[in-house]
């Protein structure tokens, strides 16, 4: 029996953001792409994930203009390898 692998369904070149991007810029980018989550990457390395919910919460604060993706992203993320079974 052939096992279905993650590599068969994964997006090989996902949209990503920098941790230095403002929360407003990240929210605008996410809205433009019509997606709800973005990997946060520095120098090709995954640093975390930011969600639409986290950005909306940050934008509802008193001074969202000082917040960046690094301030609201999740850093405890699960990573799966392409050859793992789906």
Image (cartoon, grey):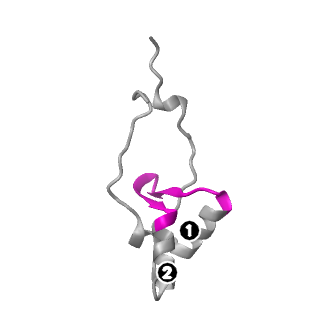
Looking at the figure, which quarter contains the N terminus? top left
Measuring 41% from the left and 70% from the top, which residue is drawn there? 72
Label 1, on which residue?
A: 26
Q: Is residue 60 magenta?
A: no
Residue 50: image x %, image y %? 46, 61
Number of residues whose C-alpha sits closer than 10 Å to that of mark 2, classed few (under 14), some (14–19) or many (20 or more): few
Residue 76: image x %, image y %? 32, 55
- Gap between marks 1 and 2, in whole Å? 14 Å
User: Which disc number belongs to residue 36?
Assistant: none
Q: Which residues are magenta?
A: 32-53
Q: Earlier in the sequence, mark 1 or mark 2?
A: 1
Q: Mark 1 falls on what kind of element? A: helix
Q: Is residue 43 magenta?
A: yes
Nearest the viewer among 38 and 12 is 38
Residue 83: image x %, image y %? 42, 28
Q: Is residue 41 left or right of residue 25?
A: left
């Amino acid at each position: 029996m052939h096992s279905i692998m993650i590599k068969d369904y994964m997006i090989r070149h996902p949209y990503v953001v920098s941790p230095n991007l403002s929360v407003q810029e990240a929210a605008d980018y996410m809205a433009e792409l019509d997606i709800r989550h973005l990997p946060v990457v520095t120098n090709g390395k995954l640093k975390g994930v930011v969600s639409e919910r986290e950005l909306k919460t940050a934008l509802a604060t008193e001074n969202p203009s000082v917040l960046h993706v690094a301030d609201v992203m999740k850093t405890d993320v699960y990573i799966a390898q392409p050859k793992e079974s789906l």
